[in-house]
Image (tube, rainbow, N blue to C red):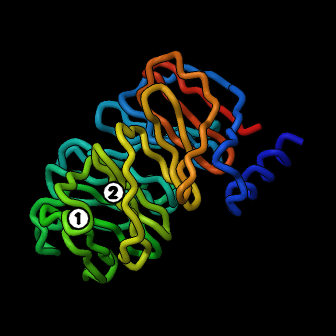
Amino acid sequence: MCCMKKYLLFCFLSIFSISSAQEIETKLISKSELLVDKLIGVDDLENIFYIKNNVLYRKSQEELLRYNNFNLGDITSVNIQNPFKIILFYKEFNTVIILDNKLSELTDPIDFTKETLFNNVQFVSLSSENDLWLLADDNKMHLYDYQNHFQKLETQPLGFYQKDFNTTIMKSTYKYVWVFSANGVIQFNEYGSFLSFTAIHYQDFVQPYEKGYLYKNNKALFYKINKQKIPIQIDLKYPLKEIYINKTSIYTYDGQFIYQYDFL
């Protein structure tokens, strides 16, 4: 019955028949200790990804895997949207490495300074197939094919779409990419076409979900889809360090415990 409820909610959100007045209810399922520097997320097979002492770990019930490359400095970001193509970005060295689900290297280090004209990539996120979204120091979005080493497209500078736009977060799915500032979010589709600018103030802990995204505003969570802003009922009395959402659960982390909430 529980699995059926999760499936129904997944379909419910996918067809976007929720009205803006409704709320998404959740229930705390588990709370477990996890002492790490940063929680990356939990995939659909309940593998937990986290960083500790600049080492990436993948923890399951059967094994603990790890990956490090100290020659590239600190890990800036990790994308586990596709657990078979995990993206590690090392901003200090302007470099990305792609890992498989066993945390083995699928590629040699991709040095953007050598392979592109971008000396200072600011943000990296996953797109479809062998593509990456890059936000470079020219303030443009670039779709880069890392396997064939060429740029497929670029957008106008973000200031063209919204004046004085300064990116703080970039997130993507296979179909969409969002860039966030302190005052709002710009959305593009997979072809780099501008879709919208939405004014949203003080958003944090952004995580894509289906055709929208979850975000925190003050002490509340919301799911933003098109023009709808749907509250998510979660008790956030503890300090919040990380949020991650997959198809069935929302995970939060307070620096000591990881909490799993399932949809009702």
The local secondary structure at tag 1 comes to helix
Name the disc covering residue 158, or none: 1
Residue 124 occupies quadrant? bottom left
Asked if 57 appears above or below 228 in the picture, the reply is above
Q: Position of residue 253 (x, y in %)?
A: 49, 27
Residue at image position (18%, 60%) is 121
Residue 235 occupies quadrant? top right
Can residue 126 be seen here? The reply is: no
Residue at image position (84%, 40%) is 2
Total marks shown come to: 2
Cα separation between marks 1 and 2: 9 Å
Q: Amino acid at mark 2?
A: Val
Residue at image position (57%, 35%) is 251
Name the disc covering residue 179, or none: 2
Query: Which residue is nearer to you in this view: 178 or 104?
Result: 178
Q: Position of residue 237 (x, y in %)?
A: 53, 16
Query: Which residue is nearer to you in this view: 91 or 221?
Result: 221
The local secondary structure at tag 2 comes to strand
